[in-house]
């Protein structure tokens, strides 16, 4: 039988997951509009988002548009489109959570969304990535 603490923690996880899913849905709703922007218009999104932040909008409010801009820039420059789970991972990072992912699931792509959003404050962003290896190393 699950302890009361375990049940409470699972309830919190469900709420967080629903919030992350809502962010991904909001970004998806903006995708067609961002695909229609010229390269110059897409670049100008950063200026607009910074102005809106400076005028009092929160990063949480700007998240869908910022993530949509990053997704489109990635699609155009790298040929890589963020999947919903990667958008959710970026939102989790922005919200101060840990996003654990396996090799090949797009950790670097996930980090671009949260880094861009938080860079809108013009205060700098630091990302730390833990790298572990299951391979043992030996010295001869």
Image: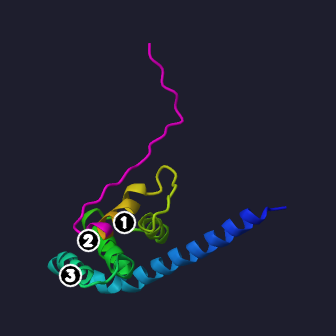
Q: Secondary structure at mark 2?
A: loop
Is 88 displayed left or right of 10 in the figure? left
Q: Residue furthest top?
A: 140
Q: Say if 119 sits above or below 61 in the image.
A: above
Q: Say if 124 sits above or below 134 in the image.
A: below
Which range is magenta? 118-140
The location of residue 131, given as percent across then percent down, is 44, 42
The location of residue 8, given as percent across then percent down, is 70, 69
Earlier sequence position, callout 2 versus callout 3: 3
Residue pointed to by mark 1: 114
CA distance for labels 2 and 3? 9 Å
The residue at the point 42 percent across, 56 percent down is 107
Q: 98 or 26, which is in the foreground?
A: 98
Image label count? 3
Earlier sequence position, callout 1 versus callout 2: 1
Earlier sequence position, callout 3 versus callout 1: 3
Decide if residue 80 is in sight here: no
Residue 15 is covered by the magenta coloring: no
Q: Secondary structure at mark 1?
A: helix
Residue pointed to by mark 3: 51
The residue at the point 44 percent across, 70 percent down is 91
Q: Say if 134 sits above or below 28 in the image.
A: above
Residue pointed to by mark 2: 120
Between marks 1 and 2 in the image, the one whose residue lies nearer the viewer: 2
Between marks 3 and 1 in the image, the one whose residue lies nearer the viewer: 3
Q: 70 or 61, which is in the foreground?
A: 61
Q: Are marks 1 and 2 in contact (CB under 8 Å)?
A: no
The residue at the point 40 percent across, 68 percent down is 82
């Amino acid at each position: 039988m699950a302890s009361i603490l375990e049940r409470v923690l699972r309830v919190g996880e469900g709420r967080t997951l629903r919030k992350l899913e809502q962010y991904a849905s909001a970004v998806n709703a903006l995708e067609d509009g961002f695909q229609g922007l010229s390269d110059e218009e897409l670049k100008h999104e950063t200026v607009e988002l910074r102005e809106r932040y400076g005028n009092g909008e929160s990063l949480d409010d700007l998240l869908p548009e910022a993530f949509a801009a990053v997704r489109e820039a990635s699609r155009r420059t790298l040929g890589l489109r963020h999947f919903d789970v990667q958008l959710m991972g970026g939102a989790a990072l922005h919200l101060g959570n840990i996003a654990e992912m396996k090799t090949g699931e797009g950790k670097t792509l996930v980090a671009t969304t949260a880094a861009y959003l938080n860079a809108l404050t013009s205060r700098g962003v630091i990302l730390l990535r833990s790298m572990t290896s299951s391979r043992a190393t030996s010295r001869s």
